[in-house]
Amino acid sequence: MNNTKNPDSRVFAVERDGSSVLLDDDGRPKRTGSVMTATAHIITTVIGSGVLALGWATAQLGWVGGPLGLVAFSLITVLASYMLSSCYRTGDLDNGKRNPTYMDAVRSFLGGWKVKFCGLVQYGQLCGAGVGYTIASSLSMLAVQKSSCLHRNGGASGEASCKMNSNPYMIAFGVAQIFLSQIPGFTELWWLSYVAAVMSFTYSSIGVAIGFVKVAENGWKIKGNLTGVPIGTITKGQKVLRTFQSMGNIAFAYSFSMILLEIQDTIKCPPSESKTMKRAAFASVIVTTVFYMLCGCSAYAAFGIMTPGNLLTGFGYFNPYWVLDIANIAIVVHLVGAYQVYVQPFFAFIEKRAANSFPNSALVTKEFAIPMPGSKQPYKLSLLRLVWRTFFVFCTTLTAMILPFFKDVSGLLGAIAFWPLTVFFPIEMFVVQMKIRRWSAKWVALQTLSLICLCISLLAASGAIYSISKSLKVYRPFRANH
């Protein structure tokens, strides 16, 4: 090992293949991430398919509850992100032991059964996101085809002749993900996150524009009311359950805590990873909240209580139809990248466990060097990566084909993961990291927030489960239902 003169004493160099390679304090290649790359990863994750259900959620909550819900969840997300980013290192925020994954942090600060509970919820959420993104992408691809069909058959009057099956599109999305899943890890995903972030702004902007155009067509009359869909239009029980489900949709739209530390582990130092991540999280949540407000409120203002569960696929004969086609294509491109941002931590977890359990297995350790045109470095194809990741994509695609209920699935995913990953674990680890005294004013305030969020999660999950069970009564798998 040869030490190099570096302003950051935690960086050193070693000789590899005749050249000096910079390494970080944990022996890994020096991280190069910045506020920009971290923000791109977060925006790719946050401004995802969940934004498309915010109009429907606002319609259930009304002009008072909708905006207040968005603001409340944004504040909770920022607070949780600050607490969680402080737990990237154990002890000293600048020089402590790194916790490159969420489970590593829980293991360092809490230990015991909480580690297994964290892994179950986190990786379950990541797998669920893969299913949700497969559903959303297929609906957008289907919307493009259906839009063309409707315009050939006289608009809304041709609805009956334009029933289609989303399964071929799910399969196509799955095939694309099989190839992209061979990208080794998070570090190599930066370019895909930039593309996906641009696409998310594209279709969100179109969604906002559609809302304003519809309001203008309505003579600038703002639809909707203060309390959302009124009782009478739906029953009291449906109103309560839809309100809970809306909370789950908003929670899903803000969910990125489960991969925050994985993103933070790509950031270079100095300055400290915690400072950079806090800046990235704050900027990302501000940007997304503005977009969410515009999308949710403009959709509700335009369509009122008839706002669809997925804004850009709910009006296939909207004119000019090519605008919606562009938006839906942008959604598909975005979700291609977002899928990878979500599932890469799960891939890494399984492959690390396999390497530790079977260090002498050729399936786990063997790699084949494949020359890449225009690159000096060959691509290293891993047998484990090829087999395991292909199997994972197959499973998420099949599950999506069986349960293709976009807003219901997104609401359930948001409800399940919101309390443990966004609130409970960040608070518990922060209390340990900052040595907050039990029963002090700060401790009581944090525990009260955790209890309130637990109640919200449980209620939101109940609403989503009811909606999914209701949809399953009339849905016929593998047939044209759209």
Image (tube, grey):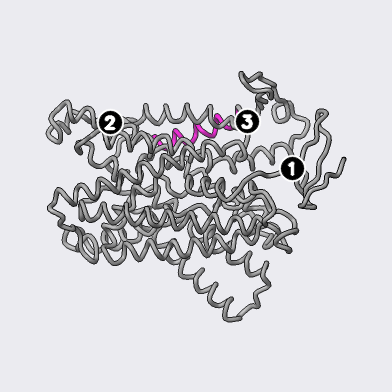
Give the Cα separation between the discs numbered 1 and 2. 50 Å
Question: Which residue matches tag 1?
Answer: 28
Q: Judge whether 230 appears above or below 361 on screen.
A: below
Q: What amino acid does circle 3 point to? A: Arg
Marks 3, 1: nearer the viewer: 1
The mark found on residue 394 in the picture is: none
Q: Identify the residue at horizontal 43%, vertical 57% (top origin).
A: 251
Q: Secondary structure at mark 1?
A: loop
The quadrant of the picture occupied by the C terminus is: top left
Q: Judge whether 418 appears above or below 138 on screen.
A: below
Give the Cα separation between the discs numbered 2 and 3. 34 Å
Could you tell me what secondary structure mostly forms the magenta stretch?
A: helix
Question: Which residue matches tag 2?
Answer: 480
Contact between labelled residues 1 and 3, with CB atoms less than 8 Å apart: no
Q: Secondary structure at mark 3?
A: helix
* Percent coordinates x, y for residue 150 in the rendering: 19, 30
Earlier in the chain: of badge 2 and badge 3, it is 3
Magenta span covers which residues? 387-402
In the image, residue 420 lies in the stretch drawn in magenta: no
